Amino acid sequence: DVKVTQSSRYLVKRTGEKVFLECVQDMDHENMFWYRQDPGLGLRLIYFSYDVKMKEKGDIPEGYSVSREKKERFSLILESASTNQTSMYLCASSFGGGGEKLFFGSGTQLSVL
Amino acid sequence: RKEVEQDPGPFNVPEGATVAFNCTYSNSASQSFFWYRQDCRKEPKLLMSVYSSGNEDGRFTAQLNRASQYISLLIRDSKLSDSATYLCVVLRGGNEKLTFGTGTRLTIIP
Protein backbone atom coordinates (compact mmCIF):
# COMPACT_ATOMS: atom_id res chain seq x y z
CA ASP A 1 0.00 0.00 0.00
CA VAL A 2 1.08 3.54 -0.74
CA LYS A 3 2.11 5.40 2.33
CA VAL A 4 2.25 9.15 2.66
CA THR A 5 3.69 10.19 5.99
CA GLN A 6 3.45 13.61 7.55
CA SER A 7 5.91 14.36 10.28
CA SER A 8 3.50 15.65 12.92
CA ARG A 9 -0.19 15.07 13.67
CA TYR A 10 -0.51 18.15 15.87
CA LEU A 11 1.69 21.23 15.99
CA VAL A 12 1.45 24.41 18.04
CA LYS A 13 3.54 27.42 17.05
CA ARG A 14 3.72 31.08 17.91
CA THR A 15 3.08 33.99 15.56
CA GLY A 16 6.23 34.87 13.63
CA GLU A 17 7.89 31.47 13.99
CA LYS A 18 9.24 29.65 10.96
CA VAL A 19 7.40 26.36 10.54
CA PHE A 20 8.39 23.30 8.54
CA LEU A 21 5.87 20.61 7.61
CA GLU A 22 7.43 17.49 6.18
CA CYS A 23 5.88 14.90 3.92
CA VAL A 24 7.39 11.67 2.66
CA GLN A 25 5.90 9.15 0.21
CA ASP A 26 7.22 5.66 -0.40
CA MET A 27 5.82 4.80 -3.86
CA ASP A 28 8.10 6.76 -6.17
CA HIS A 29 5.28 9.11 -7.15
CA GLU A 30 6.07 11.97 -9.50
CA ASN A 31 3.54 14.41 -8.12
CA MET A 32 3.22 15.83 -4.65
CA PHE A 33 0.75 18.37 -3.29
CA TRP A 34 0.10 20.48 -0.22
CA TYR A 35 -3.50 21.38 0.68
CA ARG A 36 -5.05 23.09 3.62
CA GLN A 37 -8.54 22.21 4.79
CA ASP A 38 -10.78 24.63 6.65
CA PRO A 39 -14.43 24.26 7.68
CA GLY A 40 -16.75 25.59 5.00
CA LEU A 41 -13.89 26.14 2.56
CA GLY A 42 -12.92 22.60 1.73
CA LEU A 43 -9.47 21.61 0.52
CA ARG A 44 -7.48 24.36 -1.13
CA LEU A 45 -4.25 23.78 -3.05
CA ILE A 46 -1.24 25.66 -1.73
CA TYR A 47 1.63 24.34 -3.86
CA PHE A 48 2.40 21.28 -5.94
CA SER A 49 5.38 19.67 -7.57
CA TYR A 50 5.68 17.43 -10.62
CA ASP A 51 9.35 16.66 -10.23
CA VAL A 52 12.38 17.13 -8.05
CA LYS A 53 13.31 20.79 -7.59
CA MET A 54 10.17 21.79 -9.44
CA LYS A 55 7.29 23.67 -7.83
CA GLU A 56 4.16 25.42 -8.93
CA LYS A 57 1.80 27.72 -7.10
CA GLY A 58 -1.63 26.51 -6.27
CA ASP A 59 -4.62 28.65 -5.42
CA ILE A 60 -3.40 30.10 -2.12
CA PRO A 61 0.43 30.23 -2.10
CA GLU A 62 0.79 33.51 -0.22
CA GLY A 63 2.69 33.11 3.01
CA TYR A 64 4.02 29.67 2.06
CA SER A 65 6.97 28.20 0.23
CA VAL A 66 7.94 24.62 -0.60
CA SER A 67 11.00 22.52 -1.18
CA ARG A 68 11.45 19.29 -3.10
CA GLU A 69 15.09 18.26 -3.03
CA LYS A 70 14.34 14.54 -3.23
CA LYS A 71 11.58 12.78 -5.10
CA GLU A 72 10.06 11.24 -2.00
CA ARG A 73 10.02 14.36 0.16
CA PHE A 74 7.98 17.56 -0.17
CA SER A 75 8.27 20.21 2.52
CA LEU A 76 5.92 23.09 3.23
CA ILE A 77 7.44 26.14 4.88
CA LEU A 78 5.66 28.95 6.67
CA GLU A 79 8.29 31.67 6.74
CA SER A 80 6.56 33.68 9.47
CA ALA A 81 3.52 31.93 10.84
CA SER A 82 0.34 33.93 11.35
CA THR A 83 -2.88 33.09 13.15
CA ASN A 84 -4.79 32.83 9.86
CA GLN A 85 -2.55 29.91 8.95
CA THR A 86 -4.11 27.82 11.70
CA SER A 87 -5.53 24.91 9.73
CA MET A 88 -5.37 21.22 8.86
CA TYR A 89 -2.57 20.67 6.34
CA LEU A 90 -2.77 17.66 4.07
CA CYS A 91 -0.01 16.35 1.87
CA ALA A 92 -0.83 14.13 -1.11
CA SER A 93 1.01 12.30 -3.85
CA SER A 94 0.14 10.66 -7.16
CA PHE A 95 1.78 8.87 -10.08
CA GLY A 96 1.27 11.63 -12.62
CA GLY A 97 -0.58 12.43 -15.81
CA GLY A 98 -3.31 14.56 -14.27
CA GLY A 99 -6.60 13.46 -12.79
CA GLU A 100 -5.05 10.46 -11.19
CA LYS A 101 -5.75 9.05 -7.77
CA LEU A 102 -4.39 11.12 -4.90
CA PHE A 103 -3.01 9.44 -1.82
CA PHE A 104 -3.20 11.64 1.25
CA GLY A 105 -1.22 11.71 4.44
CA SER A 106 -3.13 11.76 7.71
CA GLY A 107 -2.73 15.50 8.07
CA THR A 108 -1.10 17.98 10.43
CA GLN A 109 -3.34 20.16 12.56
CA LEU A 110 -1.36 23.37 12.97
CA SER A 111 -2.34 25.94 15.55
CA VAL A 112 -0.65 29.33 15.46
CA LEU A 113 -1.05 31.28 18.67
CA ARG B 1 -19.78 31.34 -8.14
CA LYS B 2 -17.66 28.55 -6.70
CA GLU B 3 -15.94 26.22 -9.15
CA VAL B 4 -17.41 23.18 -7.44
CA GLU B 5 -20.54 23.37 -5.32
CA GLN B 6 -22.09 20.79 -3.06
CA ASP B 7 -24.96 20.79 -0.62
CA PRO B 8 -23.16 20.55 2.73
CA GLY B 9 -26.00 18.58 4.32
CA PRO B 10 -26.13 16.96 6.74
CA PHE B 11 -28.10 14.17 5.18
CA ASN B 12 -29.48 11.90 7.93
CA VAL B 13 -30.67 8.70 6.30
CA PRO B 14 -32.00 5.46 7.83
CA GLU B 15 -29.98 2.33 7.31
CA GLY B 16 -31.01 0.49 4.17
CA ALA B 17 -32.31 3.55 2.39
CA THR B 18 -31.10 4.96 -0.90
CA VAL B 19 -29.50 8.38 -0.88
CA ALA B 20 -28.28 10.59 -3.69
CA PHE B 21 -26.46 13.87 -3.85
CA ASN B 22 -25.29 16.11 -6.62
CA CYS B 23 -22.37 18.37 -7.25
CA THR B 24 -22.28 21.19 -9.81
CA TYR B 25 -19.20 22.57 -11.50
CA SER B 26 -18.80 25.89 -13.27
CA ASN B 27 -16.00 25.28 -15.77
CA SER B 28 -17.38 23.62 -18.88
CA ALA B 29 -13.83 22.64 -19.87
CA SER B 30 -13.46 20.41 -16.82
CA GLN B 31 -12.09 17.07 -17.89
CA SER B 32 -12.32 14.50 -15.14
CA PHE B 33 -14.49 13.97 -12.13
CA PHE B 34 -14.19 12.02 -8.92
CA TRP B 35 -15.87 11.29 -5.63
CA TYR B 36 -13.67 11.11 -2.55
CA ARG B 37 -14.77 9.99 0.88
CA GLN B 38 -13.49 11.52 4.11
CA ASP B 39 -14.21 9.97 7.48
CA CYS B 40 -14.24 12.16 10.56
CA ARG B 41 -10.71 13.30 11.45
CA LYS B 42 -9.24 11.22 8.64
CA GLU B 43 -7.71 11.98 5.27
CA PRO B 44 -9.75 11.88 2.03
CA LYS B 45 -9.66 8.68 0.01
CA LEU B 46 -10.77 8.08 -3.56
CA LEU B 47 -14.19 6.45 -3.69
CA MET B 48 -14.67 6.34 -7.44
CA SER B 49 -14.00 8.09 -10.70
CA VAL B 50 -16.95 9.38 -12.70
CA TYR B 51 -17.06 8.43 -16.36
CA SER B 52 -19.14 9.98 -19.12
CA SER B 53 -21.12 6.79 -19.48
CA GLY B 54 -21.73 6.51 -15.76
CA ASN B 55 -20.25 3.83 -13.58
CA GLU B 56 -21.20 1.54 -10.79
CA ASP B 57 -19.18 -0.02 -7.99
CA GLY B 58 -21.27 -2.29 -5.82
CA ARG B 59 -23.86 -0.15 -4.06
CA PHE B 60 -22.42 3.08 -5.44
CA THR B 61 -23.34 4.64 -8.77
CA ALA B 62 -21.78 7.79 -10.17
CA GLN B 63 -23.10 9.75 -13.13
CA LEU B 64 -21.98 12.74 -15.12
CA ASN B 65 -24.25 15.21 -16.89
CA ARG B 66 -22.04 17.47 -19.02
CA ALA B 67 -24.94 19.45 -20.47
CA SER B 68 -26.08 20.57 -17.03
CA GLN B 69 -22.59 20.44 -15.52
CA TYR B 70 -23.23 18.22 -12.57
CA ILE B 71 -22.16 14.87 -11.23
CA SER B 72 -24.12 12.67 -8.88
CA LEU B 73 -23.50 9.90 -6.40
CA LEU B 74 -26.14 7.34 -5.53
CA ILE B 75 -25.76 4.98 -2.59
CA ARG B 76 -28.15 2.04 -2.39
CA ASP B 77 -28.89 -0.07 0.68
CA SER B 78 -26.95 2.33 2.85
CA LYS B 79 -24.82 0.94 5.71
CA LEU B 80 -23.78 2.55 8.96
CA SER B 81 -20.22 2.48 7.62
CA ASP B 82 -21.25 4.80 4.78
CA SER B 83 -21.42 7.68 7.27
CA ALA B 84 -18.78 10.14 6.07
CA THR B 85 -18.27 13.35 4.15
CA TYR B 86 -18.35 12.90 0.39
CA LEU B 87 -16.15 15.26 -1.60
CA CYS B 88 -16.80 16.09 -5.23
CA VAL B 89 -13.55 16.64 -7.12
CA VAL B 90 -13.10 18.13 -10.57
CA LEU B 91 -10.01 18.27 -12.77
CA ARG B 92 -9.84 21.64 -14.42
CA GLY B 93 -9.11 21.71 -18.09
CA GLY B 94 -5.59 22.54 -19.11
CA ASN B 95 -3.67 22.77 -15.87
CA GLU B 96 -4.21 19.41 -14.26
CA LYS B 97 -5.20 20.81 -10.89
CA LEU B 98 -7.91 19.20 -8.89
CA THR B 99 -10.60 21.36 -7.31
CA PHE B 100 -12.40 19.97 -4.29
CA GLY B 101 -15.94 20.75 -3.25
CA THR B 102 -16.57 21.48 0.40
CA GLY B 103 -18.24 18.12 0.87
CA THR B 104 -21.62 16.64 1.72
CA ARG B 105 -21.94 15.15 5.17
CA LEU B 106 -23.88 11.89 5.34
CA THR B 107 -25.00 10.15 8.52
CA ILE B 108 -26.67 6.75 8.36
CA ILE B 109 -29.04 6.19 11.26
CA PRO B 110 -29.63 2.69 12.69
Image (cartoon, helix red, strand yellow):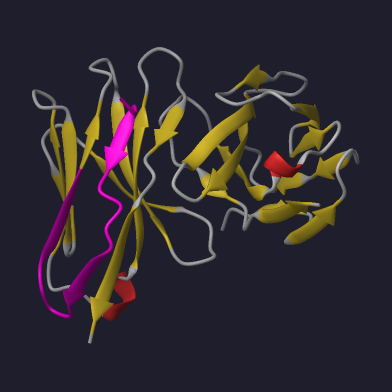
Residue name at image x 29 percent, y 21 percent:
B30
Pick the quarter of the image with the N terminus of chain B.
top left
Q: Residue at x 10, y 27 (%)?
A: B68
Q: Is residue A8 visible?
A: no
The spot of residue B70 in percent (x, y) is 17, 34
Residue visible at 10% across and 74% down in the picture: B17
Is A32 positioned to the left or the right of A11 in the image?
A: left
Where residue B53 sits, quadrant-wise, is: top left
Q: Is residue A37 above or below residue A107?
A: above
Give the number of marks.
Answer: 0
Q: Seen in the image, is B68 located left or right of residue A44?
A: left
- Looking at the rendered image, the quarter that the C terminus of chain B falls into is bottom left
Residue at (78% x, 37% y) in the render: A75
Observer-nearest of A45 and A104? A45
| Residue A4 coordinates in the image, percent (x, y) | 65, 51
Instruction: Work out whether B42 lies above or below B22.
Output: below
Q: Is residue B2 left or right of residue A27?
A: left
Residue B12, x across and y down, in percent: 22, 71
Q: Which residues are magenta?
A: B1-22
Q: Quadrant of residue B58?
A: bottom left
